[in-house]
Amino acid sequence: MGGQCAAAWFSADKYGEEFQGALLYLSKLAMKDAEAGLGSYLQDFKSKAVAWQQMAVKPALPEEARRHQVLAEYAYKNKDVAKAIMEYTAALNIYPYWPDGQSNVANLCAEVGTRRGYDLAVFHMQVYLMLVPNAPDAKAAQDSIFIWADKRNSAAQ
């Protein structure tokens, strides 16, 4: 009887490994789809960013986006990185042409330290540079992109 239990355990372990492999495969497929979606968004955003740059007077941050900014900054002060990311993202969904918001959420996403966090950090910093390519910190922002892209390759899923 003990041999049958051991055989059943071994078999379950084998299927568990197969299941884990299948999940990893599906996860990698989903990541490729997400990366393709972010790349597509960047292509579309590029022309909008140029138009925004050419505006003599930039629109003020809408009040609802500013509310999320306040909540993001408060969350960050309280060391709640996940909440800060969520609030910055909400603000950027309302007004994606906010350079400081793009930079702030990029840095927060990099703090997460996962592959997805680094993907989002790179994405948001690329958007930041599209909006303000001549920013005083543009070189440092580009350096961060290089570092995060490298870290993403060795980060946990």
Image (spheres, rainbow, N blue to C red):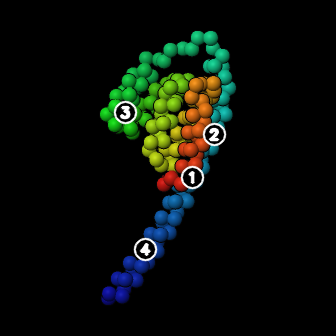
Residue underneath mark 1: 153
What is the quadrant of residue 135 in the picture?
top right
Residue underneath mark 4: 13
What is the quadrant of residue 57 in the picture?
top right
Q: What separation in Å lies between label 4 and label 3 (alpha carbons)?
A: 42 Å
Question: In the image, what residue type sits under mark 3?
Answer: Tyr
Q: Secondary structure at mark 4?
A: helix
Lower sequence index among marks 1 and 2: 2
Front residue of this view, candidates 14 and 65: 65
What is the quadrant of residue 126 in the picture?
top right
Residue underneath mark 2: 39
Lower sequence index among marks 1 and 3: 3
Question: In the image, what residue type sits under mark 2?
Answer: Gly
Q: Secondary structure at mark 2?
A: helix
- Closest to the camera, between mark 1 and mark 2, is 1
Q: Residue at x 53, y 40 (%)?
A: 120
Q: Are marks 4 and 1 in contact (CB under 8 Å)?
A: no
Lower sequence index among marks 2 and 3: 2
Lower sequence index among marks 4 and 1: 4
Instruction: Determine whether, in the image, residue 79 is placed left or right of residue 149.
Output: left
Mark 4 packing: few (<14 Cα in 10 Å), some, or many (20+)? few
User: Where in the figure is residue 20, as x and y percent of width and height?
Assistant: 48, 64
Question: In the image, what residue type sits under mark 1?
Answer: Asn
Question: In the image, what residue type sits under mark 4?
Answer: Asp
Residue underneath mark 3: 76
Question: Does residue 129 lie above or below 35 as drawn?
Answer: above
Q: What separation in Å lies between label 2 and label 3 (alpha carbons)?
A: 28 Å
User: Where in the figure is residue 5, as x and y percent of width and height?
Assistant: 35, 82
Q: Secondary structure at mark 3?
A: helix
Which quadrant does the N terminus fall into? bottom left
